[in-house]
Image (spheres, rainbow, N blue to C red):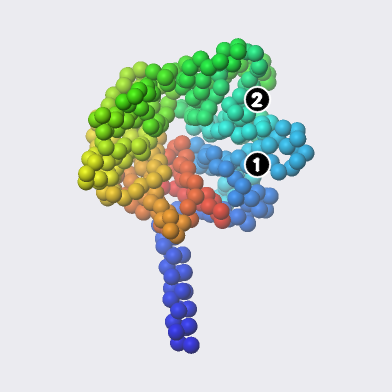
Amino acid sequence: MRMAKKNYQIAIFWIAFFFVSCFCYGENYFLISKADLEKYDVDIKKLNPVNLAPDGSYFVAGEGVQDLEKRAQGFTRMLRVLRFSQKKLSKVDTILLPITQWVNAVVNDTKNEVLILGNQGTKILRVNLDTMQLETLWEHKKGKAGFKIGPSLLCDKGTYYATGWFYDEQQFWQGDFLVQLGIKEEKKGQFEVRFLKRVKLDDVFINKEEEFNKAHYYISGTELLYNIVKIKERKTHLMHYKNKQIHALDKGFLLDVFIGNAYKIFYSVVYDEKPEVLQHFVMDLKTKKKWKIGADNEYYTYPFLSPKGDKLLVCVLNERYKVLTVYIAKEKDNYHLDKLLHNVPIGPMHISADGNVYSLMTPQWLRIGNF
């Protein structure tokens, strides 16, 4: 009996410890529970996050349509917009999307709209998130030259960019490009979309027998990060492409994790084959000044940089217990890591375009917080 009582006390201690440890950091936040969403007929487990509003005032996600009649009409996906007021869920807007397959979507970083790619990259939709008005901007027409868009889609200072490949009238490949989407309304409800060539990717990602590209990250329509693995040298080079100019930033035995913007980049590198020491850095692209981030041999995953590069978020996963710890680092503090969240359930994270709000979605709740 004493043993049972002791085990019960220990169990209560660990439950309390875990609960407190989950919520003792990042106090400026609010939670939207699974039950809160169910009041609006939304199942959180079926949501596919897109991103937060530029100012964090709403959250955009996609969801599959289950109604067989609507699916037969060509509506296999819908857009959900979760709106917040006074740290509570105030409204959920829903709009059916006339696509049979979802490719990608991006929330505009300067205005309240979202661009959606569907149907294997052959259809572009736009939704005004103030009015929930849906527009079909472009759709592939058989027998005409065009551009198969995707999978990458981004928005920089209000302008949309995407990867893809051009094809001729016979649908034959004409080269891989990063393009700007030139969207023009010819008359009410009718649009022309021009795919303006910005970067010929075949000229950047040159794959040879002795060197090849393994990873890349698009910053804007004229700027990107990528790596080149040089087999004979046994080194991986981190490269920066901007306005048709290419510069080497760093190199190491392993260098596969990196993100960035026009001001700063974050990357993880193992400089030498032996001893194998994993290190992490933030680099200023203009001055090339570097800040060492955190401890050696710590695995920081899912990094996020604010638009100005003055804030960094990184995660440490505990796969055994299916939880993660999120750290924040600020330039004003020399990018010293501080805990933002501790032992929270693993789920997709996003940050707003203004760099002040984050979201974390789990099967039980959506957390919105300031950092």
Give percent across and percent down for residue 6: 44, 82
Is 337 placed above or below 60 here? Answer: below
Q: Tell me if 112 is positioned left or right of 325 in this view.
A: right
Q: Residue at x 48, y 17 (%)?
A: 175
Q: Residue at x 36, y 47 (%)?
A: 300
Q: Earlier in the sequence, mark 2 or mark 1?
A: 1
Amino acid type at circle 1 is: Gly
Q: Disc 2 vs disc 1: which is toward the camera? A: 1
- Per the model, the C-alpha gap separating discs 2 and 1 is 19 Å
Give percent across and percent down for residue 168: 57, 12
Amino acid type at circle 2 is: Thr
Classify mark 1: helix, strand or loop.
strand
Q: Circle 2 sits on which residue?
A: 136
Give percent across and percent down for residue 43: 64, 50
Q: Circle 1 sits on which residue?
A: 64
Is 7 placed above or below 334 here? Answer: below
Q: Quadrant of residue 265?
A: top left
